[in-house]
Image: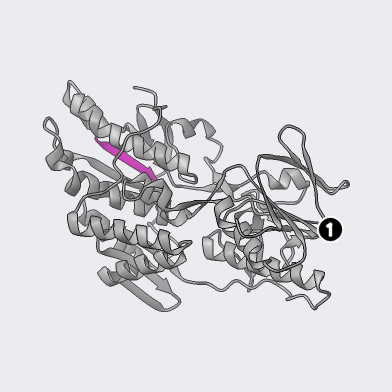
Amino acid sequence: MKHRIVVVGAGFAGLQLVQDLRGLDCQITLIDQRNHHLFQPLLYQVATTLLSTSEIAWPIRRVLRERKEVTTLLSTVEGVDRPAREVVLRGGQRIGYDTLVLATGARHAYFGKDQWEADAPGLKTLEDATTIRRRLLLAFERAELAADETGRQAHLTFAVIGAGPTGVELVGIIAELAHRILPQEFRHIDTRKARVMLIEAGPRILPAFSETQSDYAKSALEGRGVEVHTGTPVTDVSAKGIVLGDQPIAARTVIWAAGVQASRAKDWLGAEADRAGRVMVTPTLTLPDDPQIFVLGDTAHVESDGKPVPGVAPAAKQQGSHAARTIRARLLDRPEPGPFRYRHMGNLATIGRNAAVIEYGSFKLRGWLAWWVWGIAHIYFLIGARSRLMVALSWLWIFLSGQNSARLITQKETLKDG
């Protein structure tokens, strides 16, 4: 009987592992609750009308169609029966394994205020992106219909909570949408009067970057009409808006970019986890008490060179490759590669049209050249020539025409009127 490898999660880590196991004589089952692999670094561009969903997501079955040893299952994992060495699926079906890989990613963290999610959606899935895109576009439509100035301004106030790369990238595009792209398309409102707010409880935006890069990003955003608020936390979120410290602000569109927590993998395994719910693993990315169970990506807490490995796409892909080398070595009775070491690929964030920041060790780049480097890097990491071509053409069209190409309001609206 062939060695059975079960991989839960088709994100960066899980898909990289499956791809790197090509040619190994084994049986692989890949389980995900969605039928697509998502390029999350560009998810905010779907949310802000720059790209369509099909340009940053690919059907898993199509990606792996030539891999006859791989079985793909669209299902939700409910638990892991470690004594029986089985994964338990919703509905009761069980999938046996010899090696188990959990790469189930992360979800939004509202720091004990989960009730905020309905009014301040986060950005982790295509569903999140289309929800945010719908709310952004509906905000302008509702402002056009508003009978009084107070209601109109509430609809034209956009608050993004959390000033990491996702938050910075979101407000940069929202500001461009309001101030540059939409003004000629409405008759009763001036979209340039939109209030776009970036809110960070900490002392500065982009805290993973150096202070000089952070200061540049703040200045560039303010030059685009974004209000940057630091040092004061949001204390309440509702359908009517937010409370910043003790100041209520009427804002009908609120987006959460302030924190994440790991999936429920720790509960399935009964394993030790850190405060964010990430499973504590050994330097070989396995459970301390079970070397046949790997935990990767945002689901895992692992250190490299004495520092926790960040929850970013390059780290997840590197972990997937390292776990694949370990599994291959075991099945071929060869020496294992040893502890995982993270190779930092630098920090990148785009601020808007012709502005970005890049940092790699002591090397720093910002401005229009950084924006082009950022774009080329992201196109390079997309899957397949078609995706690279489509995204490149979409960006070229936006650059030349000044018009975003994915401004469709679709699906049912779930936002409560207030």
Q: Quadrant of residue 157?
A: top left
Circle count = 1
Q: Nearer the viewer, residue 228 or 336?
A: 336
Q: Is residue 327 left or right of residue 200?
A: right
Quarter of the picture containing the N terminus is: bottom right
* Residue 62 placement (x, y as % from top left): 55, 53
**Colour setup of the view:** one colour
* Residue 28 placement (x, y as % from top left): 72, 56
Q: Is residue 242 left or right of residue 29?
A: left
* Residue designated by label 1: 289
The answer to whether residue 247 of the structure is visible from this angle is: no
Magenta stretch, residue numbers: 156-164
- When the figure is inspected, residue 216 is found, relative to residue 198, above or below; the finding is below
Residue type beneath disc 1: Asp
* Residue 325 placement (x, y as % from top left): 70, 71
Quarter of the picture containing the C terminus is: top left
Q: Nearer the viewer, residue 383 or 62?
A: 62
Q: Nearer the viewer, residue 410 or 211?
A: 410
Q: Is residue 333 magenta?
A: no
- When the figure is inspected, residue 148 is found, relative to residue 165, above or below; the finding is above
Q: Nearer the viewer, residue 274 or 72?
A: 72
Q: Residue at x 46, y 43 (%)?
A: 126
